[in-house]
Image: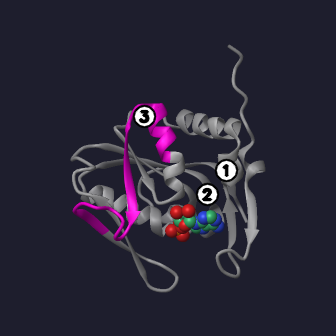
């Protein structure tokens, strides 16, 4: 079988200025989702970046689900949903985190993570790191061991990595 092509994912991402508010450049990943070769290559690249044994992928609502679900399937691990408050039907463990204005809360369902589970946290973008930091905390509160983070994109100029304890890797880095 011919080796599969490595797609340049950065070329597929569309910058949308001033969305959802002035000053934010939104990184739109929908062209990757629309193109099966790009999607396959993205999942391959994530899978190859994970070189330690893990039990579960913890995927962050909502675009993290689009990466986390095929990746967990590919790696043969469980998938844990990290969601905004009020979306998960059963009893949850909660973690608050600061936003530019106010606070938000993320949750994981009790029992979805077990004590000692080796977890890899997945999201599309690392920006200020608030979401990822809250995810790391909620996983630890649930008793899991956070092995690391994998992001499609790291907006390095926002220094999100400084908030995180576990090691991170990203497929694409933006320096400005
Ligand atoms: P933060 O908590 O600031 O690191 O923001 C991370 C979360 O917000 C991720 O779940 C991203 O999906 C989303 N996000 C932040 N900045 C962007 C951006 N420029 N483009 C797309 N999504 C973003």
Give the quarter the ligand 1 occupies.
bottom right
Give the crowd class for mark 1: few <14, some 14-19, many >=20 residues within 10 Å. some
Mark 1 highlights which residue?
A: 172
Q: Is residue 36 left or right of residue 137?
A: right
Image coordinates for residue 20, horizontal then vertical, percent:
64, 76
Which residue is at a point 50% across and 64% down the rendered structure image? 162
Q: Is residue 59 left or right of residue 41?
A: left
Question: Could you tell me if residue 160 is visible in this image?
Answer: no
In the structure shown, which secondary structural element does the residue marked by tag 3 occupy?
Answer: loop
Which residue is at a point 61% across and 37% down the rendered structure image? 45
Q: Is residue 77 magenta?
A: yes
In this view, the residue in front, 14 or 160, is 14
Mark 3 highlights which residue?
A: 52
Image coordinates for residue 52, horizontal then vertical, percent:
42, 34
Q: Check the image and report above or below for 133 versus 38.
A: below
**Residues marked 2 and 3 touching at CB (< 8 Å):** no
Identify the mark nearer the N-term, 1 or 3: 3
Q: What span is in magenta? A: 68-94
Mark 2 highlights which residue?
A: 154
């Amino acid at each position: 079988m011919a080796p599969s092509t490595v797609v340049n994912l950065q070329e597929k991402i569309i910058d949308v200025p001033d969305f959802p508010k002035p000053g934010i450049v939104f990184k739109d990943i929908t062209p990757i989702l629309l193109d099966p070769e790009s999607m396959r290559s993205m999942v391959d690249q994530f899978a190859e970046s994970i070189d330690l044994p893990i039990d579960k992928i913890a995927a962050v609502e909502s675009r993290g689900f689009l990466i986390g679900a095929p990746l967990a399937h590919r790696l043969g691990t469980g998938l844990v949903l990290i969601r905004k408050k009020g979306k998960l039907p059963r009893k949850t463990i909660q973690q608050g985190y600061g936003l530019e204005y106010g606070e938000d809360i993320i949750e994981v369902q009790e029992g979805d993570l077990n004590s000692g589970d080796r977890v890899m946290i997945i999201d599309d973008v690392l920006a200020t790191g608030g979401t990822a930091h809250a995810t790391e905390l909620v996983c630890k509160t649930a008793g899991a061991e956070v092995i690391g983070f994998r992001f499609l994109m790291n907006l390095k100029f926002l220094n999100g990595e400084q908030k995180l304890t576990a090691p991170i890797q990203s497929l694409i880095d933006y320096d400005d």
